[in-house]
Amino acid sequence: MVTLLCVAVVLPMDAGAHPGSGIVVDRAGNVYFVRAGEFVVYRRSPDGKVIKFVEDDIVRLPHHLFLGRDGTLYFASDFDGRVWRVSPDGKLTEHFNTNRIPAPSPVNVGSWGDPWTMDSVGNVYALAAPNGRAIVRISPTGVVTPIATNARFGELHFSSMTFGADGALYLTDANRVWRVVGDSATRIGVRSTPLENGAGVAVDSVGGIYVADYMALRVVRLMRDGSEATPPAIAGLRLSNPWGVTIAPDGSVFVLDHTAGGSGVAIWRVRGDNVERLYFARGARVYTATALIALITLLLALQTVMRVPSRRLDWMLWTIVAGAAIGGLWWLGRNLFLFEWLRHPILALFVFGVVRSGKRIMSRDA
């Protein structure tokens, strides 16, 4: 248990939850974005002030932000298949719940960070199953319709979706981009340097397709014929792990960049030849809670090993040690979806072990 907790201290954040293309810009110039491993949607106002626009434990790791025409913000949360709606004044309400879909259904909208989006009439587009390779359209009444059924999509878990001004659905697929119209899907291959992991996607007013290539540490602009037309200012960006890209109403390109191995985040704005980093925050604090729990656990373990054995006292000390370890794993489960399924079984085993060992020690001391 102690070893597992110590390993968790150096576990990189992007091995767990990923933020998806979590950045959008409204007409007033407010930038909404997410950070890896947090239950928060941030807002940066035009004056540079950054606040926690949405912060609620009911929202699990928000991702793939979507902005409606009326300025309403939407996003999906991990684990529960729900899409949330946030009014301009910050009021949070549930917009869509996968449980509304009549059973049986393989759809779980946005679960585990899967991509999703909406069209202008309120239909939700999502994967047919977590980490699936099929796309479905879900009407506001919960009717599920498979689309682009003949397309051979690859791994879509780390992809993103968006609609272009032409009404087509654009979808990243590792090293490809797809353009979906109705039930027809056209693959857009990259003629020059292939994509490595297309995470975020956005389409400008003239059909240019911007892709945040997470693994290649770049943002590229592609045309529908697969040719690359990346503006020099964007090609010159020095990025760590770009997850999201969006086009502001004024045509500016915004890039969401996450530092490798943590929740550090930067927001870049490119307007013509002008490049500006609007926001930057380091992510070292992500490891603080885990490091403190690991340190307490190690100190208690060493103190127990070096002292004269006493059954009743040792049981109490090791209960504290196990409790500290459980606390660390619980924190990980709350912040990294990789550990989410471990939380409740570990807690049950902890309670069972404490009660069982306590009864044995008490019976021996009696």
Image: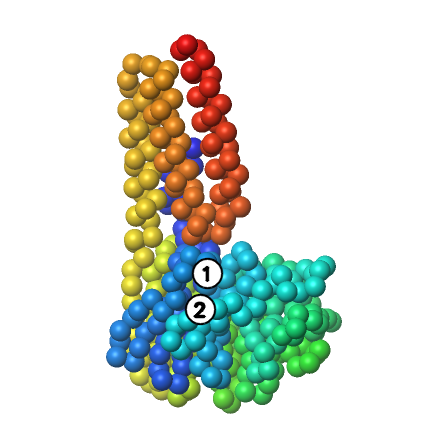
Q: Secondary structure at mark 2?
A: strand
In the depicted view, which residue is nearer to us: 276 or 300?
Answer: 300
Image height check: is 223 above or below 265? Answer: below
Q: Residue at x 42, y 15 (%)?
A: 362
- Image quadrant holding the N terminus, namely top left
What residue is at 67 percent from the left and 77 percent from the top? Answer: 185
The secondary structure type at the circle numbered 1 is loop
Kind of residue indicated by mark 1? Val
Q: Is the residue marked by circle 1 packed among few (<14), some (14-19), or many (20+) residues within 10 Å?
A: many
Q: Amino acid at mark 2?
A: Leu
**Residue 239 visible to an observer of this rendering:** no
Of the pair 57 and 49, the residue shown nearer to us: 57
User: Looking at the image, do the residues carrying marks 2 and 1 touch, with CB atoms under 8 Å apart?
Assistant: yes
Residue 75 at x, y = what percent?
49, 69
- Name the residue carrying label 2: 92
Q: Which residue is mark 1?
A: 59
The residue depicted at 41 percent of the width and 10 percent of the height is: 366
Q: Nearer the viewer, mark 2 or mark 1?
A: 2
Residue 106 in view, yes or no: yes
